[in-house]
Amino acid sequence: MQIGVSFIMRHLLCSLLLQLTTSLFFAACVLAQEDTPSKEPSQEPANLVITPNRTPTDVGSIGSSITVLDQSYLENLTTPFVSEALRSVPGLEVVSTGAPGQVTSVFIRGANSDHTLILIDGMRINNNSTGGVDLADLRLEDVERIEIIRGPQSVVYGSEAIGGVINIVTSRPSAGLALKSLSEGGSFGTYRQDLSVSSGNEDLRIRAGAGYLSSDGFSSASEKNGNSERDAYENTYASLAIAAPFASDGLAEASTRYLKGETDLDGFEFGRGPVDDPNYTQSHEMTLASVALSKPINETMKPRLELGFVDEDYLGEDPDTAFNAYEFTSRSYQTSALLPMKVSDSQEVLLGFSYERREAQNLGSFDEADDVEGLFVHNQWSIPDLASLGMGMRYDHVSSFGEELTYRLALSAPVKASNGRFKSSLGTGFKAPSLSQLYFPGYGNPDLDAEKSLGWDMGWEQSFLEQTLTYNITFFHNSFKDLIAYDSTSMIPTNISEGRAYGFENEVRALPSEFLEVAVSYTYTDSEKEDSGDPLPRRPKHSAKADLILGPYEQIKASASFRISRDREEFSGEKMDDYEVCDLGLSYDFSPSVQPYIKVHNLFDQDYEEVTGYESPDLSIFAGVKVRM
């Protein structure tokens, strides 16, 4: 463990001086403004979610399983990364290959890591070359909330939404003037500085943010195998969002985000596993830009047009190993046209069309593209105090393989006499083969079909003691067919594999007092490959999670989180580490504007691996200060 107290104090002192100067400047600007400053707005009211139906919908009418990580929860974490925030979600597992910046994936209800569709403000960021998303560099700054919906969701979102959807919803710019700043330092030579400012009036609102993080890291390749080289990491991000009304009740929104991660990577030796490689580095850059226009036609029709662009580049460099030298690019152009129509007080219909141009280039290997067109209809029908039913169908045409038809049904039925709610959903999903699977020389197979899934869940949500105690249990079952696997006979990837995963999620949330909030969950997942009967790799059979938040009490707020993982197997069939991890956090409201904090990761210094051969962080401590104006 490396705490680096002098390092922390030196950088915190410099950061505080920077924040003091900046704060004085913005205070003068506030005094000069005639508009009354407003607090940071919520994207949607607390009981409304966007992701299930792509329109604001009351969470109580949603039959699918959904978790919302709101702004207060995310800020309490004080983590810089989206992946760390997701670790508390039932039915979702985050897997990392070591130090900050190393490959990080998610698995939802036993589905593959590339079976999760990940969005930023509704815009797909899955890589066209691999089909998945490496979460390692995704920052949490300027994120309003994260909505996670579990189960097949291809009716609304098309390809990749087999296991579920993660929608990262960023903060909208606010009126008035608001400043946020964060400085942090700690173990592994870590330093972090983030700054955001939002300003505007009723005619124009702008929000900008930027941040930098660096870490000396630790040896991701297991020290048990004789590795000791630290894997350093740097992360830079910047964001800009603009919102302006037009034509009285119309709204135009534009945003762009840029991130760059630079990390040291390890090599690999057959028979030994990950090994130190002092010259292997990788640079990852992502640029996103989007524009959304919404303008009500009347009280019942509110069309919305969304345009998006995502550019992602990976550059690997290693003068000693040719295999580690690569450059590949993924680029997407996205268009969506949505027409929500309120047919009656009890019925809302959504018509949608989407088009996406997916391009991928691997320097010296291939340069290909796919066109994906989708047309869908979704009907949300409700009878007050009795039931809400969502029904939808979607048609997709993918230029690389052809057509796909998906459907979804979701029912929510409250039982007011007991303060309970029955919920259930049934749906299908698909994932188009990635461009690498189709076209990579010597590996790709242009005749691949889509991977498919059929999933259902059924559960009960019960509230007690005036809704200060909530219990939720959901049973789920997912079956996967036409999965792409390597065929030892043809020596190319083929749609030959099948699998299934079933289990249940238990969750208890309690507010025993105004100063204490508790959330505990347990997920059981039984999965197997149909051909061999072996469990699907890296999916724990038993997973338990707990979050406790104490305060604010006398200006003090404390938090603790626990994670337990049991019974996992690697791709090779080798049994993987069981582990228990505990993290702590403590903050003090020095004033309404200044909040110093400290956080401890892996309190009991557990030695474990989320991926065989790759270390996870030892006991580590970080301290910082947040400033708001």
Image (cartoon, rainbow, N blue to C red):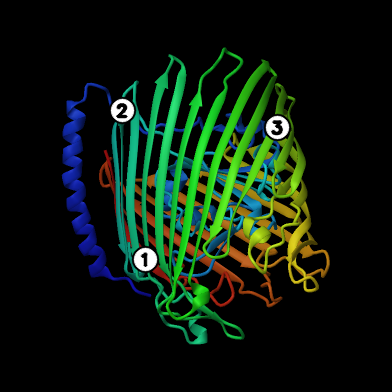
Residue beneath the point at 23% across and 61% down: 11
The three-letter amino acid code for the residue at tag 3 is: Phe
Give the CA distance from mark 2 to mark 3: 37 Å
Query: Which mark sits nearer the N-terminus, 1 or 2?
Result: 2
Residue nearest the viewer, comparing 523 with 551: 523
Sort mark 2 into few (<14), some (14-19) or many (20+) by Cα contacts within 10 Å. many
x and y percentages locating residue 38 in the rendered image: 32, 28
Give the CA distance from mark 3 to mark 1: 49 Å
545 left or right, relative to 397: left
Q: Is residue 210 above or below residue 498?
A: above
Query: Which mark sits nearer the N-terminus, 3 or 1?
Result: 3
Q: Is residue 256 above or below residue 522?
A: above
Image quadrant in which the C terminus is located: top left
Query: Any mark on residue 376, and which?
Result: 3
325 left or right, relative to 541: left
Query: Which mark sits nearer the N-terminus, 2 or 3?
Result: 2
Image quadrant in which the N terminus is located: bottom left
x and y percentages locating residue 528 in the rendered image: 78, 64
**Nearest to viewer (mark 3 / mark 1):** 3
Give the CA distance from mark 1 to mark 2: 38 Å
The three-letter amino acid code for the residue at tag 2 is: Gly
**Nearest to viewer (mark 1 / mark 2):** 2
Sort mark 3 into few (<14), some (14-19) or many (20+) by Cα contacts within 10 Å. many
Where disc 1 sits, the SS reads: strand
* Mark 2, residue position: 200
Q: Is residue 92 visible?
A: no
Where disc 2 sits, the SS reads: strand
Sort mark 1 into few (<14), some (14-19) or many (20+) by Cα contacts within 10 Å. many
Query: Any mark on residue 621, and which?
Result: 1
